Image (cartoon, rainbow, N blue to C red):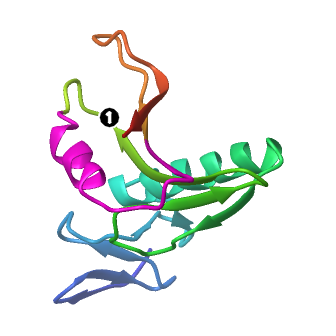
Amino acid sequence: MEKKKNTSKGTLCDIGVRKSNNNTSKSKICDIGIRRKSNNNKSFGLGKERELKKKLESECMFVSRSRGSFGTFDIQAFDNLTLRLISVKSTKQKYWSMKPEIKKIRECPVPSYCTKELWIWWSPRKDRDKKGWEVIKIP
């Protein structure tokens, strides 16, 4: 039988597994003490950025990703002729307005050889027709 010690953050068993009293913790530990991968919105979006980076690299482009950036563009991709500045958004929601993001990208000044793009990942849902990547080129 396990001995249990109450703490302010949860219950600590003899085997060192913390069972949380609240559901606000970001990292989750299952009953055997192994951290489960959390798929919150930020990690979901970062995964889509990495996926898009690999896709562009497969198209023979040089790609740089702004990690942890809260700027306008998440990915910069270039080849011999063009520089693509890309903002990546992903959503699990049924409806989501892109107007504020498009306005923000449109107001950003760039040289004439650059293209500004908004890539949106629409997660598959039963109640939505859009699924997968949608690319919006912004003048």
Image spot of residue 82 (x, y percent): 66, 51
Q: How many marks?
A: 1
Determine the residue located farthest toward the front in the rendered image. 112
Residue at x 54% of width, y 59% of height: 75
Q: Magenta segment range?
A: 97-117
In the rendered image, which quarter contains the N terminus?
Answer: bottom left
Q: Residue at x 21, y 90 (%)?
A: 7
Query: Quadrant location of the C terminus?
Result: top left
In percent of width and height, residue 125 lies at 36, 18
User: Residue at position x 31%, y 13% from top?
Assistant: 128
Q: Position of residue 4 (x, y in %)?
A: 32, 83
Residue that mark 1 sits on: 92
Near mark 1 (Cα within 10 A), the count class, few <14, some 14-19 or many ≥20, is: few
Where on the picture, by quarter, is residue 26?
A: bottom left
- Please tell me in which quadrant of the rendered image residue 2 appears: bottom left
Instruction: Tell me the amino acid under the disc marked 1.
Output: Lys
Magenta region includes residue 114: yes
Which residue is depicted at the point 70% across and 46% down?
56
